[in-house]
Image: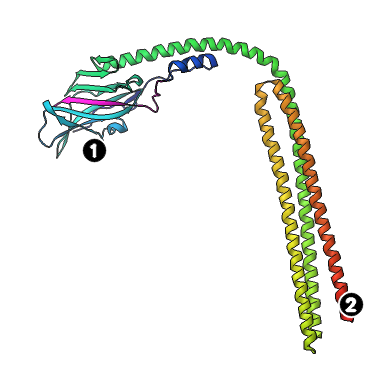
Amino acid sequence: PPPPATPAADANITLPPIPTPATTTQTTTMTTTTSNAPTSSTTTVNVKFQVKYCAKPGDTLVVLGKHRSLGNWDSRAGVQMAWGAGDIWTGYVALPAGHVYDYKYALATPSSQMWEKGANRMLTVDIEDVEVGIEVIDRWEDASGSKLVTSSGVISSTGAKLAETLQKARKSVEDALAANRSLKAELAQKEVVNRVNQKEIKLALTRVSEAEKVAKDAKEQARQAEELAIERVEAAKEEARRELEDLAGTALKRAEDAETTSSDLSMKLTQAEQRALRAEEKEAELRETLMLKEKHMKEAGEHIRSLEVEKEGLEMEMLDGAERFREALQATRALFMTEKKVIKKSVGEALQATRDVIESEKVSESEEVSETDSGSRR
């Protein structure tokens, strides 16, 4: 048998939402009156379907409709009903509140499926029905004889239930429109006050722009200092590598010259190994210095990022009034000057530490070369 005639887009009719006023006083009043009412988007209502039908052994009845809980018109996924005394079939399902559902009964036999005759039935599920639920008492192939038992009592038909729900929705919309009209008057008054504060807000924006420019200049200086430090560290590494190669060449030449005497060869080889170890230690020290420098630069970057975060916070606070803007601007300026001094001090100390390490290494290496040459002459 063909499926029932179902509307393409209006199978589930969503009730119009109730507008909420924007002012604090009226919003609080409405929230107080509806604080215990569940929302239609997250609340379901327990629905009990009952229909009288004399079926043959092995046949079952199914409630189907255009909703996932009703199987989306698929008898394999619909609400299976159970037979009871007096040929009363009963089925249970939970449906989201605040919607109107199309549904229909179908007879499922072991070999086929048969839809009840007539148009689709309609069921309105309100939020008020959450606590009690809805009991639907239908007649097979007779939609006019349906009855509903809800929180409001017995309603003669589903059409009366739908009309009642729409009437409540219209009244809620009218109340909300009246509240919005009063809000418009209050907003007009606030707009006049906001115009008075425009001049102070523009002044605060100008000061924030200046602070951004200063922060950008500090960031550029930190970047240049980082590049300079990296260049100097690379030059120190290259110089250390050349010195290591020179030391290794000298050690090899002296080892070749001392091949005639095994004792001299062992001594010079030991000296070469010691110099190589010292060179490796120096290289490790240079790496530690480089890592320390990178750490300082990262700290400088973090300081700058913290300034940017504080700047964003200042922009948000500007909306609260001109007085808060002036206070936030003063706090930002003081914090920026402090961070700037810390950054300059950290970069200066890092550069000075790098220079001291390089100078000390050069002096120690020159002393070692002098000691080695004097030992050779002896």
Above or below, 331 against 279 in this view is: above
Above or below, 95 against 262 in this view is: above
The one of 306 and 104 positioned closer to us in this rendering: 306
Above or below, 273 against 39 in this view is: below
Q: Which mark is residue 374?
A: 2
Q: Estimate the x, y position of residue 49 in percent, counting from the top left.
A: 22, 26
Q: What amino acid is found at the position of numbered circle 1 in the picture?
A: Arg
Q: Residue at x 74, y 24 (%)?
A: 326
Q: Earlier in the sequence, mark 2 or mark 1?
A: 1
Q: Is residue 122 left or right of residue 30?
A: left
The one of 347 and 220 positioned closer to us in this rendering: 347
Q: Marks 2 and 1, how far apart in space?
A: 101 Å
The one of 237 and 286 positioned closer to us in this rendering: 286
Quadrant in which residue 260 is drawn: bottom right
Q: Estimate the x, y position of residue 79 in percent, counting from the top left.
A: 24, 32
Quadrant in which residue 137 is drawn: top left
Q: Which residue is mark 1?
A: 76
Secondary structure beneath dot 1 equals loop
